[in-house]
Amino acid sequence: MPDLDYALNPYIGCYHACSYCYARLYTRMREVAEKWGDVVAVKVNLIDVLRKEAVATSKGVVGVGTITDPYQPVEATYKLTRKSLEILLQSGFKVSIQTKSPLVTRDLDLLARYRGRVDVGFTITTLKREVASQIEPRAPPPEERARALRVLSDSGIKTWVFYGPIIPGLNDDDSTIESLIQLARSTNSELYYDSLHVKPFMLADHPLTPYAKLAEVYRWDELFKRIEGRCREYSVDCKPGLTRNKPSISIKSFLK
Ligand code: SF4
């Protein structure tokens, strides 16, 4: 991710098991990768290691939740994200949190205390519950994310909405774009947008297969211009997320 100096992920694996998630491809624990969503490993020595690293490392921006959700359900028990934030913020680091869970509001006291060095982003692919439940069946519903976003924003914390992945034919329609820009506007949030990152596992026998094939021939530039144009109308700061356009691999070879 641009603008980040470090990454911190307290958990390996993610209970949310979103259908488009490709984090398992970067997971070295075989059991977690193979049973994505059903097995989550907890970095039980994280706090000890982080305490030492926070002293020995030059200050910068730490992305919290760059690979897996730092506020997935297991966090309610282990509180590794909370404890990590305390160490990082007390040591002078900035933190940039990305989540799909309203559990982040549990830590509002801490985040508000250090609000000048904190930003929080919610991934919201759509505000339509029926679409979200299709692709993110175990993640908190989008309206709960939107509510939590508003709570943080109202507390003076810098917030952003991550509209991604955009899946052609599923969440690229005008009403979805409009509703997310309105949400960003009403919460004074920035909006990041990002295309679907097509991975080989999506290309056959997968719920996303028809959409992944569409992604190759999709007119991403036109969509991005449309999003940016609407953002300008509403005076919402709007930026590309991970990639400016194009699926991250060419799928032409898989279609032959
Ligand atoms: S919340 Fe993020 S990390 Fe977790 S399964 Fe969904 S996309 Fe993957």
Image: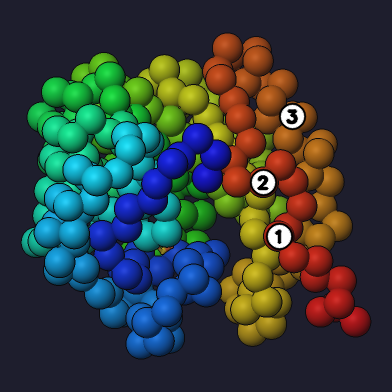
Q: Residues within 10 Å of mark 1 (few under 14, many from 20)?
A: few
Q: Residue at x 74, y 46 (%)?
A: 245
Which residue is at the front of the view, 48 or 158?
48
Q: Residues within 10 Å of mark 3 (few under 14, many from 20)?
A: some
Q: Closer to the camera: disc 3 or disc 1? A: 1
Q: Residue at x 37, y 60 (%)?
A: 68
Q: Which residue is mark 2?
A: 243
Please determine whether, in this image, residue 140 is positioned above or below residue 94.
below
Side of 200 where 74 appears, left or right: left
> Which corner quadrant holds the C terminus?
bottom right
Give the CA distance from mark 3 to mark 2.
Answer: 17 Å
Q: Position of residue 58 (x, y in %)?
A: 33, 38
Toward the front, the furthest residue is: 56
Mark 3 or 1, nearer chain start: 3
| Residue 190 appears in the figure | yes
- SS type, badge 2: loop
Please determine whether, in this image, residue 31 is positioned above or below residue 10.
below
The mark found on residue 226 in the picture is 3
Does label 2 point to a residue whose CB lies under 8 Å from ligand 1?
no
CB within 8 Å, label 3 to label 2: no
Q: Which residue is mark 1?
A: 248
- SS type, badge 1: loop
CB within 8 Å, label 3 to label 1: no
Q: Position of residue 48 (x, y in %)?
A: 12, 59
Q: How many marks?
A: 3
Mark 1: amino acid: Ser
Mark 3: amino acid: Arg
| Residue 146 appears in the figure | no
Mark 2: amino acid: Thr
